[in-house]
Image (tube, rainbow, N blue to C red):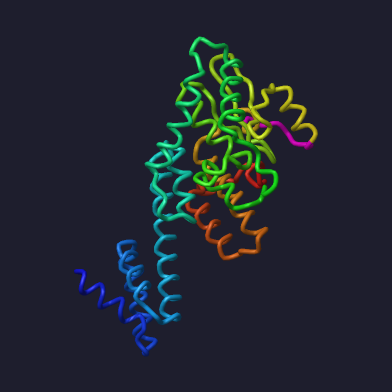
Amino acid sequence: MNNSEIKALISLLDDEDQEITEHVEQRIRQLGGQMIPYLESEWEGSFNPVVQKKIEELIHDLQYQSVLERIRVWKEGGSIDLLEGLWIIATYQYPDLSLDKLRRDIEQLYYEVWLEARSDMHPVDQIKTLNHVFFNKLKFAANTKHFHSPSNSMINIVLDTRRGNPISLCTIYMLIAQKLGMPVYGVNLPSLFVLTYKQGTTQFYINVFNRGLVFSKSDIDHYIGQLNLKPTDTFYQPCPNVDIIRRVLRNLMLAFEKTGDTDRMKEVEKIMESIQDEDAQPPLSDYTNK
């Protein structure tokens, strides 16, 4: 369709015949995200609140379908780029968010740490240096005041406010560490997401939510024992990026549930289901909001 045909189609949204408007809405959805700029233009020029409401719903539906498609393609492509996965989640609420801007933001954080890091440092000293810059200079901290806010799952907001939940702080910390060449990865613990530094026979753990506290396997043994759970590799070893994104989505679902926004909770659940492996049971730690 050319521009004039698209505009003519959208103009029929305020037709008095409901059958016509339903057909128009269906056609707009079929045409997909390319319709959003035209819908936005029509919204701005409309003085009919009913039509404006209808346009807002159409725009949301088209943007939502775009999120579903992008996250599916990301997973099918191997879920290699964690930042891209986090960006896709953030576009659910911030559809105009730029991935390039996020990359620049992470690059700037990396540069701040790189100025003080040295490649010949002992692994624990590398983490201590990263902790110093991340928490003292860059001022990242746990968002204990608004722990269940949906914004904790939006990487752009966490980067702006420097406040987040365990997994959002861990992902930013990990992205910086990996750009520095550190073998730092995510670990799915029950009720808490942490990181591990793992290279050869060297392995220890990092609690970013507790200002980068370094701890050992025996501490995890004790933690699992307190929860009366059977130890599994999931609690000790690096998890894939797709598991991290699933856990971020579960946090977002719970956040919307706590605010009473069941419609958004169901939408996020559908996003999560779109990247769930068939017949796979999510690990116990994924059911928790941390």
Task: Assign the magenta stretch its main secondary structure.
Answer: loop
Quick one: which residue is furthest to the front in this view? 137
Relative to 66, is 279 on the left or the right? right
Foreground pick, 72 / 28: 28
Whether 157 is drawn above or below 184: the answer is: below
Foreground pick, 118 / 264: 118
Foreground pick, 89 / 164: 164
Q: Position of residue 112 (x, y in %)?
A: 48, 26
Residue 232 on the magenta span: yes
Q: Position of residue 98 (x, y in %)?
A: 39, 47
Residue 191 on the magenta span: no
Quick one: which residue is furthest to the bottom in this view? 16
Residue at figure coordinates x 53%, y 30% from the top left: 174
Q: Position of residue 60 (x, y in %)?
A: 44, 65
Work out which quarter of the rendered image holds the C terminus and state it.
top right
Magenta-tinted stretch: 227-233
Classify residue 173 by image quadrant: top right
Residue at figure coordinates x 36%, y 89% from the top left: 17
Whether 281 is drawn above or below 225: the answer is: below
Q: Position of residue 43 (x, y in %)?
A: 37, 73
Foreground pick, 250 / 7: 7
Total label count? 0
Classify residue 285 by image quadrant: top right
Classify residue 4 by image quadrant: bottom left
Work out which quarter of the rendered image holds the N terminus and state it.
bottom left
Whether 262 is drawn above or below 81: the answer is: below
